[in-house]
Amino acid sequence: MRPARPAPIVASSHRAGANEAVDVMEWDVVVFRDGDGLSVGKVESVRVDDGTCVCQPLFQEEDSGVWLEATYTRGAKTVQLGDVAAILDADFAQRMAPDRVSNPHGEHAEDFWEIPADLPDGVRRGE
């Protein structure tokens, strides 16, 4: 397993200037501070002007070990850029949605991520 790389971001009060690069980008998979713990999420958008990003939390599926969006149980969260603890190497893919009642012909797909990195202790894995 590869270790997660730390996010190259300074304190959460940091405000990037107009010409300053922000290393967190849309579609990055990150570890972020979420209340008293840590969560994994996909970056939906980055708001450089106010130093935040919007993350959709992910959860780890028990059977396969892949990470799925927790859209039904946990909504998107606005996160201070300084609260992004790590940017993860993650492989994105899609698979047929397994619910055969709402997807009887197999035409709907769901996004998932494989995260080969070792995650920090205490990262929330469930929904």
Image: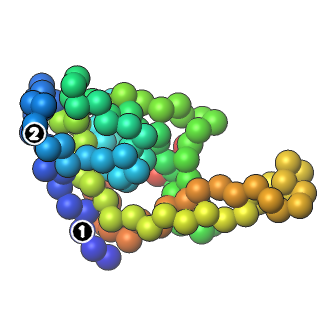
Check the image and name the residue furthest to the bottom. Answer: 1
Quarter of the image for the C terminus: give it: top right
Placement of 43 over or under 60, stated as above or below = above
| Left or right of residue 83, residue 98 in this image | right
| Left or right of residue 77, residue 93 in this image | right
Residue 100 picture quarter: bottom right
Q: Give the labeled residue for mark 1.
A: 3
The amino acid type found where label 2 is placed reads: Glu
Whole-percent x, y for residue 40 in the image: 39, 48
Q: Residue at x 60, y 68 (%)?
A: 64
Whole-percent x, y for residue 118 in the image: 31, 66
Q: Give the labeled residue for mark 2.
A: 20
Secondary structure of residue under mark 2 = loop
Q: Residue at x 10, y 37 (%)?
A: 19
Quarter of the image for the N terminus: give it: bottom left
Placement of 83 over or under 95, stated as above or below = above
The amino acid type found where label 1 is placed reads: Pro
